Amino acid sequence: MAWVDFRSFLREDSWEAENELWEELYKECGWMIKRGREFASSEPGWFCVILTSQNFVDEDQMCAPFEELKKRLGQWKEQRAAAGGN
């Protein structure tokens, strides 16, 4: 399990914005990560990534989902900025 800081991807500092990002990640990327609020995080934007038991052939295969997530988050942030968000 690892905590990740996605605060910079929130449209605002709120639990509602955290939920929006969580929904986007699930719908667009298929990522089922846990919202920080579910783990009693004191501020929105922290998420918990839990790696399941899976046999990876090599490091590239293990990193691929994280690279895709990084790409999607960047695209999502750009789209939000183009639409007039933060």
Image: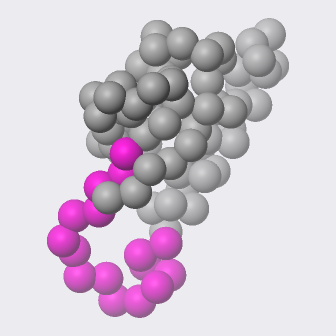
Q: How many marks?
A: 0
Q: Is residue 46 above or below residue 81?
A: below
Quadrant of the rendering where the C terminus is positioned: top right
- Where residue 58 sits in the image (x, y, percent)? 41, 89
Please identify the residue farthest to the front as the structure is shown.
42
Q: Is residue 23 left or right of residue 9?
A: left
Q: Is residue 4 above or below residue 2?
A: above
Q: Which residue: 43% across, 40% down?
A: 47
Q: Is residue 4 left or right of residue 41?
A: right
Please identify the residue farthest to the bottom as the structure is shown.
58
Is residue 20 visible to the viewer in this orientation of the structure?
A: no
| Between 61 and 48, the one nearer to me in the picture | 48
| Between 40 and 71, the one nearer to me in the picture | 40
Q: Is residue 14 left or right of residue 26?
A: right
Q: Which residue: 56% across, 43% down?
A: 5
How was this image coloured?
A: one colour
Task: Indicate whether residue 11 is drawn in magenta.
Answer: no
- Where residue 68 sits in the image (x, y, percent)? 54, 56
Q: Is residue 33 left or right of residue 10?
A: left
Quarter of the figure with residue 55: bottom left
Quarter of the figure with residue 65: bottom left
Magenta residues (range): 48-63
Q: Which residue: 60% across, 52% down?
A: 70
Is residue 12 visible to the viewer in this orientation of the structure?
A: yes
Quadrant of the rendering where the N terminus is positioned: bottom left
Q: Which residue: 40% across, 57% down?
A: 2
